[in-house]
Amino acid sequence: MIDTLTLKETFESNGFSATQASSLSHAMHELAKDKAHLATKEELHLVRNELKNDIKEVREEIKDVRGEIKDLRNQMTNLWDCLKDLRKEMTKDMENLENRLLHKLTYRTMLSQLSIGTILVTLMIYFHQQ
C-alpha cells in the first residue's frame, strides 16, 4: 500500500503545487489499489496468441473471398462473351429475316404485276375481238 501523505510531501518538495501533488498521489494510490484488475504477462500472451489466430483466420477468409471474386469476374466475362455472340447471331437472323421478307415481297409484287398484265392482255383481246 502506498503512503499517500508521504508521496504528496515528496511531490511538493520536488516543485509540484499542493493540488498537483495531491492529485498525483491519489492517482498513484488508485493504481496500486487496482493492480488486481491488470492483466498478467501470461494473460497478455494468451490474448496475443488468440489475436494472431483470429488474424490468420481473417486472412484465410480474405483469400477465399478474393478467389470467389476472381471466379465471379470470370463468370461475368464469359456471360459478356455469350451476350456478344448472341447479339451477333440475332443480327444475322434479323438480316436473314429481312432478306426473306424482301424476297417474298418482291416475288408477290412480281406475281401481282404479272396477274394485272395477264388481265389487261385478256381484256385487250376480248375488246379487240368485239
Image: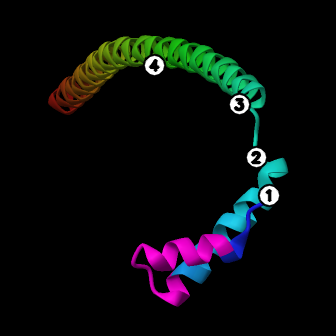
Q: Is any part of residue 26 visible from this angle?
A: no
* Magenta segment includes 17: yes
User: Label 3's element?
Assistant: helix
Q: Earlier in the sequence, mark 4 or mark 2?
A: 2
Give the side of residue 109 with respect to residue 60, left or right: left
Determine the CA span between mark 3 and mark 4.
Answer: 47 Å
Residue 44: mark: 3
Residue 34: mark: 1
Boundaries of the magenta span = 6-20
Q: Quadrant of the C terminus?
A: top left
Q: Please give the residue where the numbered disc 2 appears in the rendered image.
A: 38
Q: Please give the residue where the numbered disc 4 appears in the rendered image.
A: 76
The relative height of residue 38 versus residue 84 in the rendered view (above or below) is below
Nearer the observer, disc 4 or disc 1?
1
Q: Which residue is drawn at 23% across and 31% down?
A: 123
Nearer the observer, disc 3 or disc 4?
3
Q: Residues within 10 Å of mark 3 (few under 14, many from 20)?
A: few
Q: Residue at x 22, y 26 (%)?
A: 113
Looking at the picture, tell me which residue is in the foreground, 1 or 44. 1
